[in-house]
Image: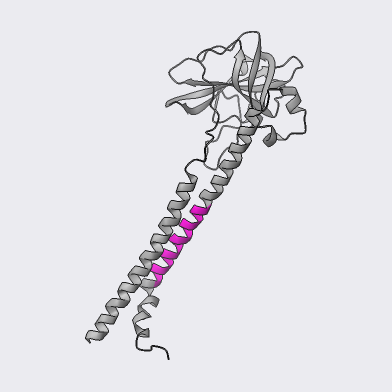
Amino acid sequence: MPDTVSLPMYRFLISPRWIALHVLIGALVALMVNLGFWQLNRLDERKALNTQVTKQIAAPVADFGDIVTSSLDADEAEWRLVRLQGTYVSNEMVLIVNRSQNGAAGRDVVMPLLLADGRKILVNRGFIPLTVDIPPSPAGEVTVVGHVRPTQKRSGLGAIDSADGTLAEMQRIDIARIDQQTAGSLEALYVQLVESIPAETLLSVVPLPDITNGPHLSYAFQWFFFSAVALFGWVFVVRRKVSEASQATTSA
C-alpha cells in the first residue's frame, strides 16, 4: 500500500522554484558531461596526431618532388622530412605574426623557394623575436630540409587577413592567400625548415608539436567529477528538505 502520508512531503519538488532548480542542475550536468566527452575526443585526436608525427619524422628524408607527385594526400604527407634545392624569392616574404616561442613574442618568416624546374614552395624559415630585425635570406642556391605541412586554416574565432592587396604580415600560412600576391603559382604544401645550407642566422627552428597526451584525460575526469558533485548536491538538498518537512509534520 503506498505511503500516502509521506507523498505530500515531496510536493515541493514541483513548485516553480524547484522546477527551475531541476532544470538548472540538469543543464549543468549535461553540459559538464559533454565537456568531459569532448576532452576524451580531444585526447583521441591528440593520440592520433602523436602517432602520425612520430611515424613521419622517423621516415628517411625524401625528395620533395617525390612527395608532391605521389598519391599521398596532404594529411598523409604532413610531417614528412623532405629535401629541396632552390633560391629564395626575398621580395615575396611574408611575416606570420602573433607567434611566440620560448616565452618570446615574435613572428615566423615565410618565403617562397624557387626550384630549378620553376616550381615555387613556401618555406617557413623560422621564428624571430619582435626585438630582432629580420635577417636577409641566404643568397644563391640553398638546400633546405624540413617538414611538409598543409596550409593553415582559420579557426572559428581566429583573426581574418584582408582578402585584397599585398600583405607584408598575415595571421597564418594561408597558401591560397599568399599565392594571390606571388608571381607564378605556389605548391599546395609548404615546408617548415629544420636545417639549411647555408645555415640560417638569428632565426630559430619552429619546434615540433609536443608528443604527449596533454591534460585532456585529467580535464575529462574533472568535468565528470563536477557533474557527479552537482548530482550529489541536488540529492543532498532534496533529502534535507524532505527531512525538514518530515520533522515539521511529526512535531505538528
Residue 9 on the magenta segment: no
**Residue at x-position 51% and y-position 27%:** 97
**Residue at x-position 54% and y-position 46%:** 42
Query: Which quarter of the rendering shows the C terminus?
Result: bottom left
Q: Could you tell me if residue 180 is visible in this image?
A: no
Residue 105, placed above or below residue 49: above
The number of numbered discs placed on residues in the rendered structure image is: 0
Of all residues shown, which one is farthest toward the top? 140
Q: Nearer the viewer, residue 28 or 66?
A: 66
Query: Which quarter of the rendering shows the N terminus?
Result: bottom left
Q: Is residue 237 left or right of residue 156?
A: left
Q: Quadrant of residue 170?
A: top right
Residue 213, placed above or below residue 249: above
Magenta segment boundaries in residue numbering: 19-37
Tell me residue 35's x, y (percent).
49, 53
Of all residues shown, which one is farthest toward the bottom? 1
Q: Nearer the viewer, residue 120 or 59?
A: 59
Tell me residue 13's x, y (percent).
38, 76
